[in-house]
Amino acid sequence: MDIQVQNFAVSNLRRRPVVVETGGFVAGFMPDTTSPYLNYATPLPGTQPTERDVAALVGAFRERGLLPRLEFAPGAAPAVEPALRAAGFDTEAVHEYLVCTPRTLTVPRSPDAPRVESPATDEEYAALDAALAEAFGGAFASSAEGVARLRNTQESGGAVRFVRDPGGGCAGGASCSPPAEGTAELAGVGTRPAFRGRGIAGAVTAALAEAMFAQGAGSVWLEYGGEGSRRVYERAGFRPQGTRLYLSLPAGRGN
């Protein structure tokens, strides 16, 4: 699964507005933000980068005033991590990823399960973006750019889903990338604190996976942020398959 997930990461970054390919790496940049979580690189599976290759990649970030940063499945490119560490890259995180297939998917069917919807209006997209900003504790601010990215995900072949709060706003939601390489990444599952514990995350996760399978994806994968969220995803049919590594180059190191 590491190879498939890594091939997906490459294909997904090639969808970015600005793409730089150098020395076996693909870097995807979003001109509307300097966020390191939206501007990063990944290696091609099997890449064996030289010192010069890594320096060229770092330069692509430096010339844009961005933090050199990579996300990848190390099992798909074993030579990459040692080359990056030799250049001064540090570990940001190591995340296990979980995978769901049509065979393992479990969709909540009880009458009291949250009703999952697709946003259709500007107001609904904006409400979801604001809800996710609140759900993630201000790690990112709600913005017009965030709303546009959600709409683009839905309109480019991915899926966006949410659950309304009792007042008609948004209690929580998530999105899933358009499929590539036979799989799709589900990300940004968030529920506003006042509405947690009501099955919203699980219902949205299952609905998104179901939507991707209806489009022909053979699997959907995601990363989780804690044991509580892992249990939610496992109940929806997601199972552990591998790890992804996040590395970045602190200021003052490298070229």
Image (cartoon, helix red, strand yellow):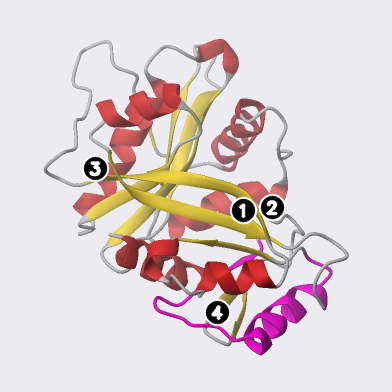
Mark whose residue sits in front, 4 or 2? 4
**Chain part drawn in magenta:** 39-66
Task: Kindly identify the amino acid type of the residue bearing the numbered disc 4.
Answer: Phe
Task: Kindly identify the amino acid type of the residue bearing the numbered disc 2.
Answer: Glu
Please give left or right for residue 4 compared with residue 128 in the image: left
Q: Residue at x 44, y 12 (%)?
A: 197
Which residue in the structure is indicated by mark 2?
145
**Image quarter (top left, top right, bottom left or bottom right) of the C terminus:** bottom right
Q: Is residue 58 magenta?
A: yes
The residues tagged by marks 1 and 2 sit, at their Cα atoms, a distance apart of 5 Å
The residues tagged by marks 3 and 4 sit, at their Cα atoms, a distance apart of 32 Å
User: Residue 3, percent across and down?
Assistant: 32, 67
Quarter where residue 141 is shown? top right
Task: Kindly identify the amino acid type of the residue bearing the numbered disc 3.
Answer: Glu
Q: Residue at x 50, y 27 (%)?
A: 172
- Of residues 12 and 44, the one nearer the viewer is 44
